[in-house]
Image (tube, helix red, strand yellow):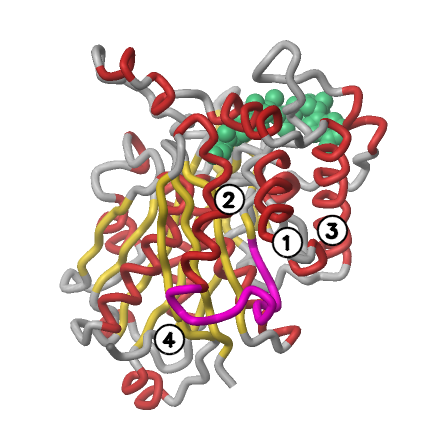
């Protein structure tokens, strides 16, 4: 197979569901903006060069339904010949989309593709607008439909991850993110137009646009004492709180993928190659353990040793599961989520895989790290992991 090169990987800011900057920005607008920006920021690339746009979305319905991959491509002004699709693997959807975009190039079936992700958790709530579990099967295997928070409680209880450990992890995520914001390290963010409705003197509402250029869920004022006071949200005697869970968030991200021939023809300097991608199933009622199995699997596929991986982006769906996976794999915490994770920056479900790719590649490049791994747990009981290799 050929190599697939990621030449551009960018994201919008991640903004708080219903309370943040994108609460009145339609998901189509977020996604079409970042698709347009990704092409614009790739020298010599034209929209007509792209063959297909694959977009991850966890609840592809309502405003982000009807094949958002196609609709957003058209809103962004790609020619009619540029096809588009939507892919769903819940929290790894954005990474799945990038992997599929890469596979198409690796197989020799395309020269340029886009993989991306989107979720407006404001417009489409987690679980969707009208969840309808199978009436008999849901009794037989109710765990497949269980709340993600309960799976986090199960991981904490079964694998003995204490409340203080979870709060400490959450605190560190917030502090790393706040520090990275202060230092201007989120250079993978493209300042993004957001809509708001303002009351006019006539008593009607007018739509205005403003530019949002930062993740608005970061709480720099977080303290360990404050976190310790929060009540558990999913189980009465539990340990999972709003402070040590990922935030529900709106956002979009996109990566441009190319063959070596196209990279050369356009005279580009690629960021990284996708070396390997994999997924693995696990028990649905402890879905958070997914990365613990997906990471060794992807490394084995690529023949790369864990100790040779310089950076990890492991999605912080919940502190309990992230701590468990990092601990079980013996990963040096200093190599994980150096600019904070989803507890501080948010987890816009279907976008997250593409968002973490943008963050990981940016950090690998800044630090000259050869191998980087991105991984996440997935609702229903799965893990996904990808290994990227920095280009010289
Ligand atoms: C846990 C959850 C239900 C909380 O939702 P929420 O109530 O909307 O969360 P918020 O961020 O608004 O936090 C609620 C309150 O907790 C407190 N809080 C949150 N983080 C805090 C922190 N770091 N320090 C102190 N207080 C904090 C605040 O009082 C906050 O209210 P405020 O924003 O008005 O100040 C939601 O974030 C969630 O469902 N997360 C998991 C998402 C998920 O399952 N994703 C899929 C994973 S597989």
Check residue 312 for magenta coloring.
yes
Q: Indicate the secondary structure of the residue bearing disc 2.
A: strand
Disc 3 from disc 2: Cα separation: 26 Å
Where is residue 104? Give x, y as percent: 22, 67
Residue bearing mark 3: 176
Q: Which of marks 2 and 4 is nearer the N terminus?
A: 4
Residue bearing mark 1: 330
In this rendered view, identify the residue nearer to me: 330 or 3: 330
Mark 3 crowd level (few <14, some 14–19, many ≥20, 10 Å Cα) = many
User: Is 369 placed left or right of 148 in the picture?
Assistant: right
Q: Please give the name of the residue rendered at 67% of the width and 55% of the height, measured from the top-left corner.
A: 339
In this rendered view, identify the residue nearer to me: 38 or 311: 311
Front label number (3 vs 2): 3
Q: Indicate the secondary structure of the residue bearing disc 3.
A: helix
| Magenta residues (range) | 300-313
Residue bearing mark 4: 5
Considering only vertical position in the picture, is 146 above or below 362?
A: above
Disc 2 from disc 4: Cα separation: 31 Å
Residue bearing mark 2: 194
Q: State yes or no: discs 2 and 4 in contact (Cβ < 8 Å).
A: no
Disc 1 from disc 3: Cα separation: 21 Å
In this rendered view, identify the residue nearer to me: 254 or 317: 317
Check residue 374 for magenta coloring.
no
């Amino acid at each position: 197979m050929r190599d697939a090169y990621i030449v551009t990987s960018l994201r919008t800011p991640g903004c708080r569901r219903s309370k943040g900057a994108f609460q009145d920005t339609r998901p189509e607008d977020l996604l079409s903006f970042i698709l347009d920006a990704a092409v614009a920021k790739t020298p010599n690339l034209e929209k007509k060069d792209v063959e297909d746009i694959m977009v991850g979305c966890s609840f592809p319905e309502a405003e982000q339904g009807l094949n958002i991959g196609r609709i957003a491509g058209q809103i962004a002004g790609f020619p009619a010949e540029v096809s588009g699709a939507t892919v769903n693997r819940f929290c790894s959807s954005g990474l799945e989309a990038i992997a599929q975009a890469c596979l198409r190039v690796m197989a020799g079936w395309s020269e340029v593709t886009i993989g991306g992700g989107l979720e407006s958790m404001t417009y489409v709530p987690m679980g969707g607008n009208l969840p309808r579990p199978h009436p008999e099967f849901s009794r037989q295997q109710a765990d497949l439909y269980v709340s993600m928070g309960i799976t986090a409680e199960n991981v904490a209880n079964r694998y003995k991850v204490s409340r203080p450990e979870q709060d400490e992890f959450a605190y560190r995520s917030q502090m790393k993110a706040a520090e990275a914001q202060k230092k201007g390290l989120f250079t993978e963010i493209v300042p993004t137009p957001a809509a708001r409705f303002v009351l006019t003197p006539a008593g009607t509402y007018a739509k205005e646009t403003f530019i949002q250029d930062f993740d608005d869920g970061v709480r720099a004022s977080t303290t360990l004492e404050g976190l310790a006071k929060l009540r558990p949200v999913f189980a009465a005697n539990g340990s999972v709180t709003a402070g040590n869970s990922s935030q529900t968030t709106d956002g979009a991200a996109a990566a441009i993928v190319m063959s070596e021939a196209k990279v050369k023809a356009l005279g580009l300097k690629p960021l990284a190659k996708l070396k390997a991608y994999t997924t693995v199933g696990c028990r649905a009622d402890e879905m958070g353990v997914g990365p613990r199995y997906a990471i060794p699997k992807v490394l084995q596929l690529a023949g790369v040793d864990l100790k040779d991986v310089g950076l990890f982006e492991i999605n912080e769906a919940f502190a309990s599961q992230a701590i468990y996976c990092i601990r079980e794999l013996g990963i040096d915490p200093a190599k994980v989520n150096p600019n904070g994770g989803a507890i501080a920056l948010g987890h816009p479900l279907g976008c997250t895989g593409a968002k973490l790719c943008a963050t990981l590649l940016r950090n690998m490049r800044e630090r000259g790290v050869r191998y980087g791994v991105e991984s996440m747990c997935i609702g229903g009981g799965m893990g996904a992991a990808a290994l990227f290799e920095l280009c010289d």
